[in-house]
Amino acid sequence: MFEMRHRSGTDLAHLRERAAGRFDAVRRRFELLTAPQPEGAHRPPLKLLGGELAYYARWLAGRAFTPCTLPQADHPKVVILLPGFGADGRRMARMAHELERAGHKVKRWKLGHNFGPSEEQFQRLSERIVEVHARYGKQVYLVGWSLGGVFAREMAKLHPDLVAKVITLGSPFSHTPWSNNLWRTYQAVTGYPVNEPPIACDLRAKPPVETVALWSPLDAVISPRAARGLAGERDRAIAVRCTHLGFADSNEAVIAVGRELA
């Protein structure tokens, strides 16, 4: 009888500890979600949000795209597409399809949904780049949308001999970590402050390969100051007139990427 009471008391203590842990986790994420905006950050005007919503509505209805035909590539490239925050490879399927029609070999990153960086994610992505390079015997071109572009820049720093070029699509690698309209959501999902990533990296440092930053004045999520960067942080910055969501698959983004691969 004493052993039964003792076990019940132990189980109850464990339940209390687990409940307290969950409460602390929820409280911390709420604090991250409601953190104050630091000084010096630059956020896109909220009036641009209507464009993002309109694009998403057309995308859901299957009316977001008009025909888009890229010219056939004289020198086909091996490309890996890296999706943005919260998305997986399927979100960039149209871009992959159009680039493949032009003759390029396009590969997915195969890491599922992108919920932020970690040592494990970087190790798996690193292995994926090594695998694709070994399979085709060519340097790969990394095309990253939003957070995927940040990943692409860091991978090129780790593998400059395997990566030929990095193309970022509305990626927040410059200015401040808070120069966007998604940083609070990002913090709440990942569980850490946007300026304290779980891996050591210098986002502004340019990779030792050709690096092109595509940015848009219509982007309601990432500030142009963060996405286009400064001289020395990338080789070139190119303006594209599409929404942030449109960077994944709009004609404007597909054509711009196709030109960079050519």
Image: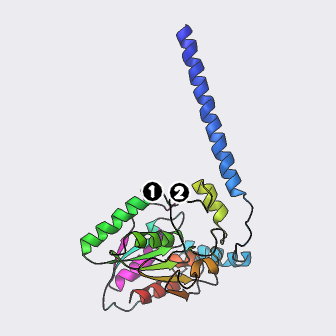
**Residue 105 in which image quadrant:** bottom left
Q: Nearer the viewer, residue 178 or 204?
A: 204
Is 75 above or below relative to 136? below
Question: Is residue 123 shown left or right of residue 194?
Answer: left
In the rendered image, is residue 202 in sight?
yes
Q: Is residue 104 magenta?
A: yes
Position of the C terminus, as image quadrant, is bottom left
Is 6 above or below relative to 233? above
Determine the residue located farthest toward the top in the rendered image: 1
Q: Nearer the viewer, residue 72 or 196?
A: 196
Position of the N terminus, as image quadrant, is top right
Q: Nearer the viewer, residue 104 or 187?
A: 187
Name the amino acid, label 2: Pro
Q: Nearer the viewer, residue 210 or 92?
A: 210
Q: Position of residue 119 (x, y in %)?
A: 45, 56
Return the mark for residue 119.
1
Q: Position of residue 233 (x, y in %)?
A: 53, 80
Return the mark for residue 198.
2
Q: Which residues are magenta?
A: 91-116
Name the amino acid, label 1: Glu
Q: Residues within 10 Å of mark 2 (few under 14, many from 20)?
A: some
Q: Secondary structure at mark 1?
A: helix
Q: Position of residue 120 (x, y in %)?
A: 43, 55
